[in-house]
Amino acid sequence: MGLFSKIKQVLLFQPTERKEKFILPPYEGNSESVSESGKVSAKYEKNLTWMKSRFSVPQNNDIVLREFTLKNGARAFLVHIDGMVRSVTVNEFILKPLMLTEFSGKNLKQQVADTIQINSMKQKERMADAESGVLIGDTVVFVEGVNAVYVCETKGFDKRSVGKPENESSIKGAQEAFSESIRTNTTLIRRIVRSPNLVTEFIQIGTINRNPCGVMYLKGLANPALVEEVKRRIGSLSSDFLYGSGMVEQMIEDGPLRLLPNLLSTERPDAVAHHLCQGRVAVVVEGTPQVLVMPVGISNLIKSPEDAQMRWQYATLTRLTRALAILLSALLPGFFVAIVNFHRGMIPTELLIAIAKTQENVPLPAMVEMLLMEFSFELIREAGIRVPGVIGGTIGIVGGLILGQAAVAANLISPLTIIVIAVTGISSFAITDFSFAFGMRIVRVLFIILAGLFGFFGLGIGIAAVMALTCAQQTFGVGEFSPKIPKTNFKSFFVYAPPPWKKELRPDDLNPAHLHNQPKISRRWILKKGEKHEQ
Amino acid sequence: MNNESALGGREIKGLLCMAILPKLFFSLLPDGVGAVGTAVWYTQLLSFGFSLLFLFAMLHLMSLYPGQTLPKIFQSVLGKGFGMVLGTLFYLYFVAYTADHLGEAVQLIKIYNFPTTPFWVFTVGFLFVAWLICRYGLKGVAKSASLFFVPVLIAVFAALAIGSKQYDWNLFFPAGGYGFIRSGMGVLGGLSVYVDLILILSVVTTEKTNLKTFGFRGMLLCGGAVVLSFLGYLLTFGYRSSQGKTVGLVEIVQNVYFNQLFQRMEAVFFLVMVIAVTMGTCIWFYLTVSLYSTIYEIKEKRELLLPNLLMIFALATVSQVQTKEFSQTAAILFRYSGGVLFLCCILVWLLGMVRKKVKKHG
């Protein structure tokens, strides 16, 4: 509407034109699949009609359906999805040879197969195979008179290259991280575990999106019952849309109500390789740069793959720091609230007076103060993650420093609370596993509330409940506090990081085929000349 | 939770320690010292020795009836009807025992820190956590106990070490106590500390678990902690001033100036006490339910949890509102009833041996 007509409309009090609102009607029509899949026919028209109806050609502009004629007069067509294939490969190694080759009358099926110059080419007899081939980026070729489809691997879509781990970074050790592509991820693992026993089994998940999901394990080492259970759980999933490891994790984990995670989700191939060699199973899912490892206990969630690359003294010190960080992260605010509210006798008089002075002008009780700061901290953290790069860092500084200082100056929060929250926040960043750190945050809030209401009584029953419940639970038949509770022969737990030459045994809670990882004396050079040792 | 599978050594030790050690935080120490005076430490040592003998006697009885727990053996030895009656009496005792301990713990918490808070808040707190854990069955309870028993044991010894600053070795004498009769009664009363043994043997069988080795080790740990705690308490407060004290171990550290950063540490031991009592309640509660289900052969234990929980809550509530005379009588009954239960079991053991021999010769 022009300016003049708008003025005229206002002056003449004309009502504005109302557009009809769109109302979403209920679904009408056939929601079933367009056509039933069956065997590939030797009849050209039948196959062509089926493929066209299945992929909604010509409405669906993503689909390339190219019809052509062979030199012997037989009609043929190929189908692929635009953007998911390498066009050069299709043109040079499928179309060109097929269109230029002279075929004799005998055994056309084999002649076509020999003509296509693709290393990974399969002859399939079911239309469903043709359909799934197209969907994953392959090119399918149908030839008149041939009752098979040629599924040629021509994948060539864009994907992110292998980058550095962003959430599990380390100074020593590998600097490669998984990407979104399942094939890249399985290759990254296979490059570390160069064993013919490393098996990858693909299972399709999601009835609509048909996402590939790879179950990786070392045959002859991983407990077959464990492998079967993982495959059973993944294979049983029934949902239209399943994408990425996060969704799969939630679909196959034990105890969805638990606060702490019970599967390891890592972006590091070296970590997955290490766990596979201990007898665990990995699940690689297309779509997210994380791979799931199972079964794991809490001891696995607080370790870093970097520990194995460091000398045992340093690694042990690092783990000790991490263990303390976990304790601080979960308990410090609760302890502070309990002591300040209920157990002041613990604190020396001078310190108590200092605390009282800082809280003198603060109108809020210690528990509310702490919860408020906890919420602010979470807000800053969340905003820092969502806001792009440089600004994200700035939010942290602005939020942390300026807001904190202003809150203290305005007598909203006592300085001690800021210190406690800051130490807690830093401690939570020292936890290696993202999900575990998340769980700890929930536990922390629970402890603050319990301590605020009942002091050490609340904290005591809170600790007992959280620890005992975690301890009583199992993941894929393995205890959360395994290998310590129930006690096993495996020496590495929470803090002590044994040197590589002391890691003779695998964790026996996994019941692997071989318990021994290496002989008692793995550094044979320490033996005297001619001396033998027991294997 | 119906799966009562084999327990490991650490789990057996955990169950024993977490059932016995929480009592050190109750009025057990002042009451014991008040009853037998300076003789308390060796009367406790004797009680511990007798309970060890009792353990071996029960293990022998269980070896005579392989694969059976104590309530089932009662039925095999005494006949189904009488065995069930005896088992039911044991069950009722342990329900009252759990409620009594819970009531005492709640009372201590109220005296110590929360005088105006209604007692049901704490009772519900303890029982709710116990119910949560008990849903995971014996294995879950035992695993939880095995997680906590080492820290609690360390805390007990740490309390005794911290309290050593105020030990007065003159209070050790005169070592004779109040004479033989009262000391003898003290030995009998001391057996009640280890009455939880019966509960554990009511659930665990010797076939699946190495009870002999790990039960013995667990008892050694508990016995050591109990005897040393009595000794520490005696050396701190003496036999005269121990009357009127309430929170046993926590009181030992109450008057000790720890350091410049933490003036007093009793709050930390209060925290340990709460954790220990929570786990203790969980074990007593679960084993009591398990005892009942064994006697009446009820497979679905989960359904028994709530009724038992309500019963224990009701009894614990009664213990809060009872008269002084009633509570004193109940305390005396609980002090000596452990010995009576032991005696019943010993009689069953003797009868069991006789029956086996008669059967062998017959």
Image: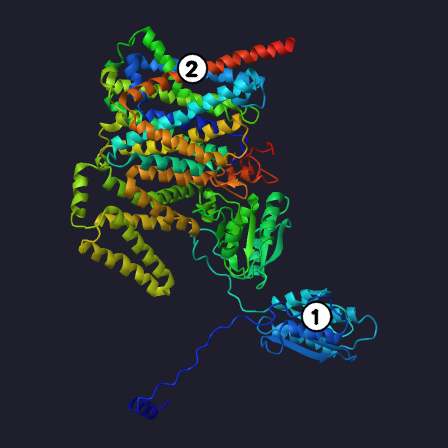
Residue at 54% across, 34% down: B3
Please identify, in this view, whether the residue under mark 1 or under mark 2 is nearer the observer. Answer: 2
Residue at 79% across, 76% down: A103
Total number of numbered labels? 2
Foreground: B58 or A409? B58
**Residue B143: x %, y % from top left:** 47, 34
**Residue A267: x %, y % from top left:** 48, 55
**Residue A27: x %, y % from top left:** 55, 70
What residue does disc 2 label?
Answer: B340
**Residue B286: x %, y % from top left:** 45, 31
Q: Quadrant of the N terminus of chain A?
A: bottom left
Classify mark 1: residues with Cα within 10 Å, few (<14), some (14-19) or many (20+).
Answer: some
Q: Is residue B239 above or below residue B273?
A: above
Three-letter amino acid code at the position of disc 2: Val
Assign a secondary structure to mark 1.
Answer: loop
In the rendered structure, find residue A255 and report the number of the disc placed on it: none
What residue does disc 1 label?
Answer: A117
Q: Is residue A472 above or below residue B196?
A: below
